[in-house]
Amino acid sequence: MEILEALLADTSVERVVDAVDRLGNGAGLKRLSYLLEVLGRDVEVIDQPMTSGISLLDPALPTRGPRSSHWGLRVKANVSA
């Protein structure tokens, strides 16, 4: 979160979303969207459809746990703004 907050201090949300979208990684876009929402940032700029299926917020953590059906993420990690 600290890295994303520092990045957003110097870069617009739209630019960060565009960079992640160009990578073509649907899970990355889901993760960014979720984290932006936790930070209270505008997620309306994300106009791309999300990929289907449930992705892991943190792939290093176990695959079981709570999920965000809105973003299609398994949210096992403890994330706060």
Image (cartoon, grey):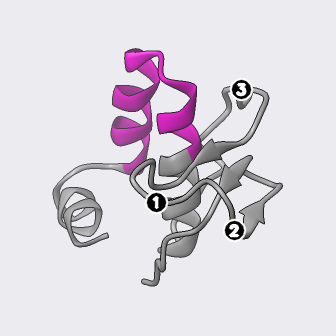
Disc 1 target residue: 61
Tell me the crowding category of disc 2: few under 14, some 14 to 19, or many 20 or more residues within 10 angstroms, Cα based.
Answer: few
Residue range corresponding to the magenta coloring: 13-30
Q: Position of residue 7 (x, y in %)?
A: 20, 56
Q: Residue 15 lies in what quarter of the image? A: top left
**22 falls in the magenta region:** yes
Position above or below: 50 against 77: above
Which residue is at a point 49% across and 62% down the rendered structure image?
Answer: 35
Disc 3 target residue: 51
Which amino acid, mark 1?
Leu
Residue at the far bottom in the pictured view: 80
Which amino acid, mark 2?
Gly
Which residue is at a point 68% across and 32% down the rendered structure image?
Answer: 47
Q: Are marks 3 and 1 in contact (CB under 8 Å)?
A: no
Disc 2 target residue: 65
Spatial CA span between label 1 and label 2: 10 Å
